[in-house]
Image (cartoon, rainbow, N blue to C red):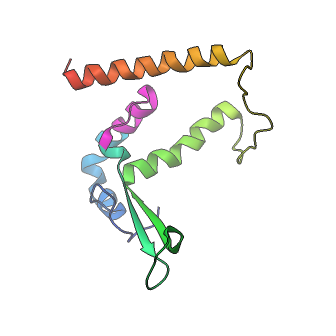
Amino acid sequence: MRLNRALGPDGFTVEFYQHCWPMIGDSMVNDVKYFFATREVFHAFNTTILSLIPKTKCPVNIKEYRPIACCNVIYKCSTKILPHRLKRVNGSLHGQFGSSRGLRQGDPISPYLFLIVIKDLTGILRRVILISSGV
């Protein structure tokens, strides 16, 4: 990641993490490992500030703005690690792929896909309820 960039939502720059790594490194590595092991993201890591920079002097339309996303450093590190972990599964890194056929209403597989998705969604909702109730 490039140095001397704007602060992320956490208020820290890349230089901060480089300078303080001896003190915070183990904790940060453990947090990222926790994310990859459990698929649970700490809310603070997933925060992004979106700024709209005008392209013209007096912008009127949304197309006359350029969006800039300010993600925090930990999020950026995690997303840079992810493709390399997926390389172990896929065998190599690949670009985007285009879908040749989508799932259509009435497709015989759609009830099974619905059950798979609803099972995971139920698990996520249960975890959110447990966390919010303090259990």
The residue shown at (76%, 43%) is 98
In which quarter of the view is residue 34 placed? top left
Q: Is residue 71 above or below residue 88?
A: below
In which quarter of the view is residue 101 placed? top right
Between 121 and 18, the one lying in front of the other is 121
Between 113 and 45, the one lying in front of the other is 113
Which quarter of the image is occupied by the C terminus? top left
46 vs 134, left or right, is right
Between 133 and 86, the one lying in front of the other is 133
The residue shown at (19%, 22%) is 134
Q: Residue furthest bottom?
A: 57
Q: How many marks?
A: 0
The residue shown at (28%, 54%) is 10
Per the picture, the main secondary structure of the magenta-coloured stretch is helix
Between 52 and 23, the one lying in front of the other is 52
Q: Is residue 6 above or below residue 129?
A: below
Q: Position of residue 114 (x, y in %)?
A: 59, 18
Q: Residue furthest right?
A: 100
83 vs 30, left or right, is right
The residue shown at (44%, 30%) is 39
Q: Is residue 123 above or below residue 89?
A: above
Q: Position of residue 35 (x, y in %)?
A: 41, 33
Q: Is residue 40 magenta?
A: yes
In which quarter of the view is residue 129 placed? top left
Q: Residue furthest left?
A: 134
Q: Position of residue 121 (x, y in %)?
A: 46, 22
Q: Position of residue 130 (x, y in %)?
A: 27, 19
Specify the segment rendered in magenta.
30-43
